[in-house]
Image: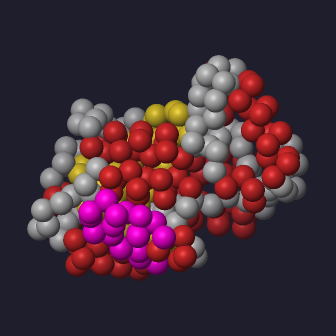
Amino acid sequence: MGSRKSVIITGAGSGIGAATAITFAANGYDVAVNYSRNRTGANEIVEQCRTAGVDAVSIRGDIAEDDDCRTIADMVMSRFGRIDALVNNAGVTRQAPAEDLEASNVGDFDAIFRVNVAGTYQMIRAAAPHLRQAGLGSIVNVSSDSALSGSGSSLAYAASKGALNTMTRGLARTLSPAIRVNAVCPGFVDTTWALAWHDEASYRSFKAELIAKAPLKSMPEATDIAEAIFWLTDKAHCVTGQCMVIDSGAGLVE
């Protein structure tokens, strides 16, 4: 078994996943940067992690495919010799106004749940034996405050994150005491994610409106979420089955 701890982070080519990879590397973890399409981003994050003096590797894989999940875990074991932590950050959505019930169909639900719920489950199943072997393993699922509010990019997305929170609590019970399982539930985070459905001008307006409404008059950044994920992984030894909301207090006024 390797001397340094190691972590797998899914969907780590950009945004929250990338910030999380850099945070773990800065704290001495070897890092496996998983991606499905963003190879360039993943490789750039690997290089940034290596500057911290740790080992890092990018691994392509679609967590919706069980074989890919098992391959990711096997490759990390071959490279690092251990898996101490898993951060399930990979997720998808499809934009659909909640008031338009015709905007989503069963295909949308299938695609979103296949990654956000089933894919996360498959990745946990693949990593669990190795997390047990390492001792005091930790899993952190990246959920959303949409799980609590029922709002967001689509009802299908919100429902998938609600299911993810339920799964987090169930697996925290099932995998204890060897593995802790928690989730973070970010509100809107200042990343490039929103540019999929905003141009830059409308995003600036949207961001300003959210900040004005939030009690803390701020919007979380990817590094804020990454630090919470690292705390849950490396410091919160008596915490399991919890879903931590990180939203600058926005949920208090919705």
Q: Quadrant of the N terminus?
A: bottom left
Q: Residue furthest front?
A: 51
Judge whether 14 appears above or below 67 on screen: above
Q: Residue 104: horizontal and vertical position, in percent?
A: 79, 58
Observer able to see residue 177: yes
x 41%, y 58%: residue: 21
Q: Quadrant of the C terminus?
A: top right
x 45%, y 36%: residue: 243
x 20%, y 66%: residue: 82
Q: How many marks?
A: 0
Nearest to the observer: residue 228 or residue 52: 52
Does residue 145 appear left or right of residue 6 in this picture? right
Q: Quadrant of residue 239?
A: top left
Instruction: Tell me if residue 60 is in the magenta stretch.
Output: yes
Q: Residue 60: horizontal and vertical position, in percent?
A: 46, 78
Q: Quadrant of residue 227?
A: top left
Judge whether 160 appears above or below 8 on screen: above
Q: Residue 8: horizontal and vertical position, in percent?
A: 35, 63
Q: Residue 124: horizontal and vertical position, in percent?
A: 36, 60
Does residue 230 appear left or right of residue 156 in this picture? left
Nearest to the observer: residue 58 or residue 244: 58
x 56%, y 56%: residue: 15
Does residue 42 appear left or right of residue 74 in this picture? right
In this picture the colour scheme is secondary structure
Does residue 1 appear left or right of residue 62 in this picture? left
Q: Which residues are magenta?
A: 44-66
Instruction: Tell me if residue 103 is in the magenta stretch.
Output: no
Judge whether 105 appears above or below 221 on screen: below
Observer able to see residue 69: no
